[in-house]
Image: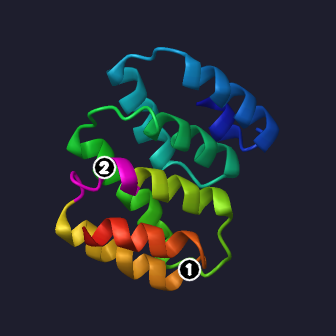
């Protein structure tokens, strides 16, 4: 958490720490708390790397965590800046793993988000997961 909060964690450091997280067994509640906190923080590349790593562990997440992650992405609806590929990859892994747990309203909002932030290769895959 301190690495994400400071905003001074480099992507290289985040990738190294994430590789350790990938190989580690982390209790569900600790992971849920971490995902919830990261989703509520200001966006950074490092937070996206950590969130991606935790989402890829495919935990059975409580609705509150899923809702927080959806809102994390929806905050970018109003932001017209270019988002990095890491952001799209994180959204893709989230939608792939939790598409059955996302409500229809949230799916509609995420599809609308893909109209604002479009990546020529990743966005169509995200939209297809949201449709089925």
- Give percent across and percent down for residue 106: 26, 67
- Give percent across and percent down for residue 123: 51, 73
Magenta residues span 95-102
Q: Residues within 10 Å of mark 1 (few under 14, many from 20)?
A: some
Q: Is residue 69 magenta?
A: no
- Give percent across and percent down for residue 30: 40, 22
Task: Please tell me whether residue 85 is drawn above or below residue 82 in the rendered image.
Answer: above
Q: Quadrant of residue 31?
A: top left
Q: Which residue is mark 2?
A: 98
Q: Is residue 96 magenta?
A: yes
Distance, label 1 to label 2, CA atoms, is 21 Å
Q: Which residue is mark 1?
A: 118
Q: Quadrant of residue 117?
A: bottom right
The residue drawn where x is 64% and y is 20% is 20
Image mark count: 2
- On screen, residue 79 versus residue 73, left or right, reads right
- Give percent across and percent down for residue 109: 32, 75
Query: For the residue labelled by badge 1, is the local secondary structure a helix, a strand or a loop?
Result: loop
The answer, for residue 87, to whether it is visible in the render is: yes
Residue 93: assigned label: none
- The quadrant of the rendering that contains the C terminus is bottom left
Query: For the residue labelled by badge 2, is the local secondary structure a helix, a strand or a loop?
Result: helix
- On screen, residue 75 versus residue 96, left or right, reads right
């Amino acid at each position: 958490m301190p690495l994400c909060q400071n905003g001074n964690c480099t992507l290289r450091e985040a990738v190294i720490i994430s590789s350790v997280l990938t190989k580690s067994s982390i209790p569900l509640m600790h992971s849920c708390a971490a995902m919830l906190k990261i989703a509520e923080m200001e966006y950074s590349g490092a937070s996206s790397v950590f969130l991606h790593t935790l989402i890829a562990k495919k935990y059975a997440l409580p609705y509150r965590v899923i809702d927080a992650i959806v809102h994390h992405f929806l905050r970018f609806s109003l932001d017209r800046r270019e988002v990095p590929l890491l952001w799209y990859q994180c959204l893709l892994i989230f939608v792939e793993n939790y598409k059955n747990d996302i409500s229809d309203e949230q799916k509609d909002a995420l599809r609308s988000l893909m109209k604002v932030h479009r990546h020529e290769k990743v966005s169509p895959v995200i939209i297809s997961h949201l449709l089925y």
